[in-house]
């Protein structure tokens, strides 16, 4: 590695890790102070608090890493530009890519590391923080348990059944908006049960306003749908099974999520499948936000005049970075609404910002 590359990389790394430390420290302090009254009221031990925030570190790191990359890139090249060192490098025959390649490589390596954290550590971290949070709130949870509602519950049961429940009330053992799909060994739908409400009592499920459809191997309805105002269903799953086996995509690795999507592919739940595919593609695209935002910071730090203050450069780039996140949120919303294909919705903002950054870099003198 050249001396110049080491010089630039040292500046970027020192600022990056300083920003990470400051952001994580401020996050913990602000979160701790905002919940201090509840912590003291519930007498949460220091060990549980430490365990909670340590388990939350991977989540916080993934969230603040892109912004730390932006600030480190801005400060490093903004300072070089202010001290006329960029002019000296360009005068010696170095291109913009040769000057910035070390930082770009750092951004790509960091993105790969974030990808690994997202897939391997983040699901476990989310599950652990949720478990500790429940443990911390155990004192007041009993009073709130009656109000707990689980929305959009999906579960695979026995006899190759797939359950979709709009609302599930664990304290009351009640479900609303129920759809049950039964499949054969080839994942063909053989029966569909739709019910307005279901109540579990005396080890039995009783469904209300229930309609049953039977299908042949080609997916055609065999006979007229059967309607029952009340019907006792032979379903072995208990409310405890629905709580313990509920699937949350945030807690899955990429392989688990891909396998879960494959299992749902024969269910006909197009909206659920589309949203899960969008979550899957985001696992691949979102880690590269750090690399893309480095490309975005390079032209802004080099385009500014020599006398421009560092604060103004940071302000302009933060605004552009904020617009980047808005563009990403809009594209994700369009993907969930079915306007864009999941793969396009997950990658559109990154592609547009990357192309825009290359355009600005090419316009540099």
Image (cartoon, rainbow, N blue to C red):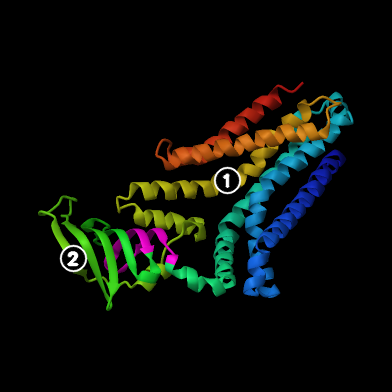
Q: Secondary structure at mark 2?
A: strand
Drawn side of residue 211 relative to residue 365, left or right: left
**Magenta stretch holds residue 347:** no
- Give the Cα distance between marks 2 and 1: 48 Å
Residue 105 against residue 24 in the figure, above or below: above
Q: Quadrant of the N terminus?
A: top right
Residue at image x 55%, y 69%?
134
Binning the other alpha carbons within 10 Å of mark 1 as few (below 14), some (14 to 19) or many (20 upward) gives: some
Find the residue positioned furthest to the left: 223
**Magenta stretch holds residue 167:** yes
Q: Which residues are magenta?
A: 147-168
Residue 222 against residue 355 in the figure, above or below: below
Q: Quadrant of the C terminus?
A: top right
Drawn side of residue 340 relative to residue 8, left or right: left
The percent coordinates of residue 90 (x first, y second) are 83, 26
Residue 1 visible in the picture: no
Pointer 1 residue: 286
């Amino acid at each position: 590695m050249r001396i110049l590359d080491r010089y630039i990389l040292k500046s970027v790394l020192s600022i990056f890790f300083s920003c990470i430390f400051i952001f994580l420290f401020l996050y913990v302090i602000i979160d701790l102070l905002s919940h201090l009254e509840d912590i003291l009221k519930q007498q949460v031990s220091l060990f549980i608090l430490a365990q909670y925030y340590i388990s939350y570190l991977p989540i916080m790191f993934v969230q603040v890493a892109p912004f730390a990359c932006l600030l480190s890139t801005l400060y490093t090249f903004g300072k070089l530009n202010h001290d006329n060192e960029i002019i000296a490098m360009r005068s010696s025959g170095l291109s913009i890519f040769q000057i910035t390649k070390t930082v770009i490589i750092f951004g790509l390596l960091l993105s790969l590391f974030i990808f690994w954290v997202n897939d391997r550590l983040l699901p476990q971290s989310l599950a652990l923080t949720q478990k500790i949070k429940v443990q911390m709130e155990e004192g007041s949870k009993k009073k709130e348990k009656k109000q707990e509602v689980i929305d959009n519950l999906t579960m695979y049961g026995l006899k190759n059944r797939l359950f979709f429940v709009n609302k599930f009330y664990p304290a009351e053992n009640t479900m609303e908006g129920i759809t049950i799909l039964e499949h054969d060994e080839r994942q063909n739908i053989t029966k569909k049960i739709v019910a307005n409400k279901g109540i579990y009592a005396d080890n039995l499920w009783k469904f209300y306003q229930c309609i049953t459809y039977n299908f042949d191997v080609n997916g055609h309805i065999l006979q007229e749908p059967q309607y029952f105002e009340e019907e006792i269903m032979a379903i072995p799953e208990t409310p405890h099974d629905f709580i313990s086996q509920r699937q949350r995509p945030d807690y899955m690795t990429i392989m688990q999520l891909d396998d879960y999507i494959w299992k749902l592919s024969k269910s006909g739940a197009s909206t659920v499948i589309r949203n899960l595919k969008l979550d899957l593609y985001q696992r691949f695209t979102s880690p590269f936000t750090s690399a893309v935002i480095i490309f975005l910071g390079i032209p802004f730090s080099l385009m500014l005049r020599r006398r421009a203050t560092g604060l103004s450069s940071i302000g302009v780039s933060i605004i552009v970075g904020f617009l980047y996140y808005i563009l990403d949120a809009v594209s994700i919303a369009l993907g969930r609404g079915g306007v864009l294909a999941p793969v396009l919705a997950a990658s559109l903002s990154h592609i547009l910002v990357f192309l825009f950054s290359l355009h600005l870099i090419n316009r540099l003198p």
